[in-house]
């Protein structure tokens, strides 16, 4: 009964370090998404992938890259972390991109010092 | 312009009472979907209810119902018989076809507190 699994759950980085957030879903969903949540801002879309092999920018893509490794996995990479990227990151998936509910992972709390 | 507006930063309700959380949206697309999510203090995002723009009936899921008023562009969440476990942040969200396919626009949320 895993659904969407994100790793790690918590991470502290120094400015300039790189890291990859991992996301995997076991619901055979086509579409996957990365959001960030900042206080008082709701969730904002960073990148999404409508299907295996495709990725597109969302509202706040600067400083991030993504890889849709296969249908199950969608990773988010910070190449050179900045304090402004301190946030909670959520991965989500949906059956397709046509008004289907998105199911979220538990989030990754990322702090950049 | 904001696509989703939640005007209530915080709401309080007594246990067993009903509460309405407000949400208005902005889109010119005739085809869109409206969603409500619950985020407890533990942080996960839990899908509650969905309303499609062409649905004739208001959506219901157990104690949750969506009061959909298309002409007013509002999609309020009604929680009946509130429970202590309903205390959480609630987000209204919308997906339309006009922009990033499948992208959800989120409001800033309403913090609901249920008191005994």
Image (cartoon, rainbow, N blue to C red):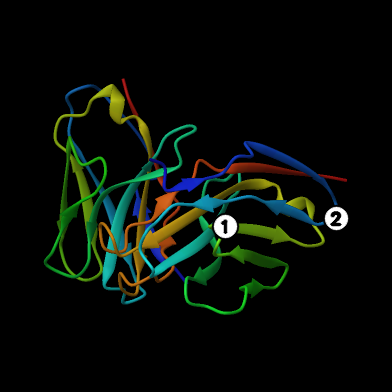
Residue at the far front in the pictured view: B71
Residue A2 lies left or right of residue B91; in this view the side is: left
Q: Dot 2: what SS?
A: loop
Labels 2 and 1 touching (C-beta < 8 A): no
Tag of residue A91: none
Residue A90 percent across, percent down from the top left: 38, 49
Q: CA distance from mark 2 to mark 1?
A: 26 Å
| Quarter occupied by residue A77 | top left
Residue topped by disc 1: B72
Q: Mark 2 or mark 1, which is nearer to you?
A: 1
Of the two numbered discs 2 and 1 on the same chain, state the one appearing first in sequence. Answer: 2
Res. A110 visible in picture: no
Residue at the far bottom in the pictured view: B56
Chain containing the residue with disc 1: B
Residue B30 percent across, percent down from the top left: 39, 68
Please rate how many residues cluster around mark 2, counting C-alpha atoms within 10 Å: few if below 14, some from 14 to 19, many from 20: few
Quadrant of image for the C terminus of chain A: top left
Residue topped by disc 2: B17
Please rate how many residues cluster around mark 1, counting C-alpha atoms within 10 Å: few if below 14, some from 14 to 19, many from 20: few
Q: Residue at x 46, y 41 (%)?
A: A42
Residue B57 percent across, percent down from the top left: 61, 78
Asked if A97 appears above or below B116 in the picture, the reply is below
């Amino acid at each position: 009964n895993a659904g969407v699994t994100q790793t790690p759950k918590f991470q502290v980085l120094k400015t300039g370090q790189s890291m990859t957030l991992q996301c995997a879903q076991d619901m055979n969903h086509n579409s996957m998404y990365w959001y960030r949540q900042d206080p008082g801002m709701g969730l904002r879309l960073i990148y999404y992938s409508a299907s295996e092999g495709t990725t597109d920018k969302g509202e706040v893509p600067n400083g991030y890259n993504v890889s849709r490794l296969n249908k199950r996995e969608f990773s988010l990479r910070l190449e050179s972390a900045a304090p402004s990227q301190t946030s909670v990151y959520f991965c989500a998936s949906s059956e397709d991109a046509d008004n289907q509910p998105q199911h979220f992972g538990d989030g990754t709390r990322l702090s950049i010092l | 312009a904001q696509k989703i507006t939640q005007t209530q930063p915080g709401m309080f309700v007594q246990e067993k009472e009903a509460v309405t959380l407000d949400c208005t949206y902005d889109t010119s697309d005739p085809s869109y979907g409206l969603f409500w999510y619950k985020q407890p203090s533990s942080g996960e995002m839990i899908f509650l209810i969905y309303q499609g723009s062409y649905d004739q009936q208001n959506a219901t899921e157990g104690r949750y119902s969506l009061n959909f008023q298309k002409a007013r562009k509002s999609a309020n969440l009604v929680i009946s018989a509130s429970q202590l476990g309903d205390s959480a942040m609630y987000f209204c969200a919308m997906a339309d076809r006009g922009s990033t396919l499948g992208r959800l626009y989120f409001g800033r949320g309403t913090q609901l507190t249920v008191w005994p």
